[in-house]
Image (cartoon, helix red, strand yellow):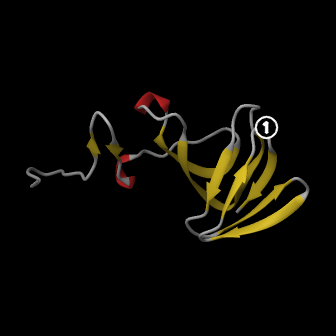
Amino acid sequence: MSQKGLVGSRAAVDRLYALLVPEGVPPATLPEWTATEVRCLTAPPMGAGFVQYQLDLQPGGGSDHQLPPATECFLYMQSGSLALTHGGTTHTMTTGAFCFLPPGSAFHARA
């Protein structure tokens, strides 16, 4: 498909899927996260049964957070490093690392 005019986008939204490109997702903030730029990639209003965020943390940014009882969390590191404390143990997450936090988990995260 060719693009005409002054502005083009690779974004595509269909009845069964949405392909969003980074430049088309505006940054926001979450109150629990400091020095963090947040992009909501998908959520129930788009038809998903979950919420997916991209979190871009500045050095020292992070969260001291308690997940709600019915909310679980999966973290995947695209780049950089994160000190994550959960259950009294601190783990250093680096590029390619991932973790699962069960519902109701309390954690401390710092870039």
**Residue at 27% across / 37% down in the picture?**
14
**Residue at 58% across / 42% down in the picture?**
29
Q: Position of residue 91 (x, y in %)?
A: 79, 66
Identify residue for label 1.
104
Q: Position of residue 6 (x, y in %)?
A: 13, 52
Quarter of the image containing the C terminus?
A: bottom right
- Residue 97 left/right relative to 7: right
**Residue at 35% across / 52% down in the picture?**
21
Q: Position of residue 60 (x, y in %)?
A: 72, 61
The residue nearer to you, when weighing 69 against 9, is 69
Say which quarter of the image contains residue 102: top right
- Residue 102 left/right relative to 8: right
- Residue 84 left/right relative to 29: right
Tag 1: Cα neighbours inside 10 Å, few (<14), some, or many (≥20)?
some
Dot 1 amino acid type: Gly
Name the outermost residue toward the top. 45
- Residue 43 left/right relative to 11: right
The residue nearer to you, when weighing 72 against 40, is 72
* 31 lies above or below 7: above
Say which quarter of the image contains residue 99: bottom right
* 104 lies above or below 62: above
Q: Position of residue 77 (x, y in %)?
A: 60, 63
**Residue at 80% across / 43% down in the picture?**
105
